[in-house]
Image (cartoon, rainbow, N blue to C red):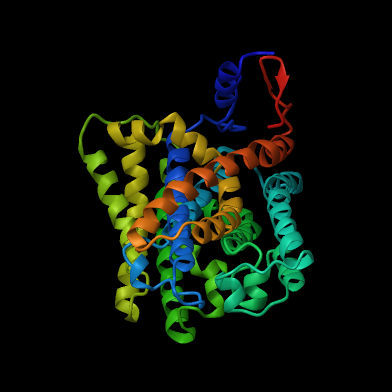
C-alpha cells in the first residue's frame, strides 16, 4: 500500500477535466471556479445572517447585512454563458450533426451526466425532510411557500418546480438554475443548427446580436408586466440573452488560436469585467426599465470582457489556469448540488453552539467554516458520484491511480 501523501498527490493529479474532443482550456474551469465561489459566498452569507438573526422569521435577501455581497445570480449568469459556449462548440466542430443518432448522443450525454447526481441529492433531502420529518429552521423555501415535500420532489425530478409552483425547489433551492439549464438543452440543438444555417460569419453575428437584443427587450417587458418575481423568472426567458451570448462568442472565437498577449490591456479588461459583473449583483433590484436595461447590458458586457481578458491576458490566463482553481471548476456541479444542504446543516448546528455578538464576526467565522467544508464535501461527491456518470456518458474506462482503480 502506497504512503498516504503519494496517494493523495496521485488522486489530485487524476482530478481535472478530460474533454472528449478538442484541446483542454483550463482557464474556462477557472471561470467556473469563480462562478461557484460567488454562489457559495452569497448562500453562506444568507445562512449566517438567518442563523444569527434575533427573530424567528427568515430575513430578506435585501437585508442591509448582505447588501454589499453580490447576489449569487451573477455567478449563475456566468455558468449559463459558459454553458452556451460549451454546448455550441461540438456543433461548430462537426462532432454533432442533425442526424437522429447525433441528437440521441447529445441528449444521452447530458442526461447521464446531470440527472443521476441531482436525483440523488433530491432523494437524500427528501429522506431527511419528507420521511424523517425534519423541518429546516429559517429556510426561505419552507417559510415562504407551503408545498409538500412529496410534491416538490416530484416536480423537481422532472425539472418542473419553477414552472409549476413559481418558486425554487424546496428540497434543493439551487435547482432552479438546473431547470433553466435543462430548458436550454431541450432547444439548444435546433437553436444552434438554425443559427449556423447562415454561412457567412458576419450574417450570423448580426443575427445573434439581434436575437440577444430582442430577448433582452422581451425580458424587460415581462418584468414590467408581471413583476420581477413573476412566473417567467424561473424559465429560460429570464436568462436566454446570456445563453445566446455564449453561442455567439463561441462562433466568433472558434477559429482563433488562444495565445495570451504580453500587453496589459487584456489583464486590465479582465479586472474591470470582474468588477462590472459583480455590480448587478450588488444593485440586485433595479427600478424601472432603464436601470434594468443598464444592469442587463453591464452583465453581458462583463461576460464578454471577462472571457476576452482571461483568454488573452497573460496574468489573468495564468491566474485562472491555476491547478487549484481548475480542480474546483471541474467539480463545480457537485459543489453546486451539495453546498446548500451542507451549509444549512452545519451552520444551524454551529451557531447554536457558538454565540457570536455581531454579524461581521459571525460572517468571518461562518465563511471560514462553511466554504472549506462545502468544497471538500463537494469534491468527495464529485469523485464518488458525479465522475462515474461523466465516464459513462463519455464511454470511457475508469482510470487507475498507481494500480488502484478510482471510480471517476
Task: Report the residue at 44% width, 60% height from top.
Answer: 355
Is 203 or 283 nearer to us in this picture? 283
Residue found at the far bottom of this picture: 225
State the image coordinates of residue 373 (x, y, percent, origin top left): 53, 44
Which picture quadrant has residue 8?
Answer: top right
Give x and y (percent) for residue 232: 54, 76
Quadrant that contains the C terminus: top right
Which residue shows up at 70% across the image and 41% down it? 385
Looking at the picture, tell me which residue is in the foreground, 115 or 145: 145
Residue 200 showing in the rendered view: no
Q: As displayed, is residue 185 above or below residue 222?
A: above
Name the side, left or right, on which 199 lies relative to 394: left
Q: Quadrant of residue 209?
A: bottom left
Residue displayed at 66% across by 64% down: 171
Q: Is residue 98 left or right of residue 88?
A: right
Against 210, residue 223 (above or below) is below
Task: Let me know if residue 46 appears in the view.
Answer: yes
Q: Is residue 111 left or right of residue 204?
A: right
Count of residue discs: 0
Quarter of the N terminus within the rendering? top right
Closest to the observer, 280 or 384: 384
Left or right of 37? Residue 13 is right
**Which residue is most to the right?**
131
Relative to 10, residue 316 above or below: below
Rendered location of residue 307, percent (x, y): 37, 45
Amino acid at each position: 500500500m502506497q504512503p498516504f501523501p503519494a496517494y493523495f498527490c496521485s488522486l489530485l493529479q487524476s482530478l481535472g477535466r478530460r474533454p472528449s474532443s478538442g484541446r483542454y482550456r483550463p482557464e474556462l474551469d477557472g471561470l467556473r471556479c469563480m462562478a461557484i465561489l460567488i454562489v457559495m459566498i452569497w448562500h453562506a452569507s444568507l445562512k449566517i445572517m438567518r442563523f444569527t438573526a434575533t427573530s424567528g422569521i427568515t430575513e430578506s435577501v435585501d437585508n442591509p447585512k448582505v447588501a454589499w455581497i453580490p447576489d449569487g445570480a451573477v455567478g449563475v449568469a456566468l455558468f449559463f454563458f459558459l454553458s452556451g459556449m460549451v454546448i455550441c462548440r461540438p456543433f461548430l466542430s462537426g462532432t454533432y450533426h442533425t442526424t437522429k443518432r447525433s441528437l440521441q448522443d447529445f441528449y444521452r450525454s447530458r442526461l447521464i451526466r446531470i440527472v443521476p447526481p441531482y436525483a440523488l441529492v433530491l432523494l437524500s433531502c427528501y429522506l431527511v425532510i419528507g420521511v424523517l420529518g425534519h423541518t429546516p429552521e429559517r429556510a426561505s423555501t419552507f417559510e415562504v411557500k407551503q408545498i409538500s415535500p412529496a410534491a416538490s420532489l416530484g416536480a423537481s425530478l422532472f425539472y418542473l418546480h419553477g414552472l409549476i409552483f413559481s418558486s425554487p425547489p424546496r428540497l434543493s433551492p439551487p435547482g432552479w438554475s438546473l431547470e433553466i439549464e435543462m430548458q436550454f438543452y431541450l432547444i439548444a440543438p435546433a437553436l444552434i443548427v438554425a443559427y449556423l444555417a447562415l454561412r457567412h460569419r458576419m450574417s450570423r453575428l448580426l443575427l445573434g446580436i439581434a436575437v440577444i437584443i430582442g430577448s433582452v427587450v422581451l425580458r424587460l417587458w415581462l418584468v414590467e408586466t408581471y413583476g420581477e418575481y413573476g412566473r417567467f423568472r424561473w424559465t429560460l426567458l429570464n436568462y436566454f440573452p446570456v445563453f445566446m451570448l455564449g453561442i455567439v462568442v463561441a462562433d466568433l472565437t472558434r477559429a482563433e488560436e488562444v495565445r495570451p498577449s504580453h500587453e496589459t490591456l487584456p489583464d486590465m479588461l479582465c479586472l474591470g469585467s470582474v468588477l462590472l459583473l459583480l455590480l448587478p449583483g450588488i444593485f440586485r433590484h433595479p427600478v424601472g426599465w432603464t436601470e434594468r436595461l443598464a444592469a442587463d447590458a453591464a452583465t453581458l458586457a462583463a461576460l464578454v470582457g471577462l472571457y476576452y481578458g482571461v483568454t488573452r491576458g497573460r496574468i489573468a490566463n495564468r491566474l485562472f489556469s491555476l491547478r487549484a482553481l481548475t480542480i474546483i471548476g471541474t467539480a463545480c456541479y457537485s459543489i453546486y448540488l451539495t453546498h446548500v444542504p451542507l451549509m444549512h446543516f452545519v451552520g444551524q448546528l454551529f451557531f447554536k453552539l457558538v454565540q457570536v455578538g455581531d454579524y461581521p464576526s459571525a460572517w468571518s467565522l461562518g465563511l471560514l467554516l462553511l466554504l472549506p467544508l462545502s468544497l471538500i464535501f463537494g469534491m468527495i461527491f464529485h469523485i464518488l458520484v458525479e465522475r462515474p456518470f461523466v465516464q459513462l456518458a463519455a464511454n470511457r474506462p475508469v482510470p487507475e491511480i498507481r494500480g488502484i482503480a478510482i471510480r471517476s
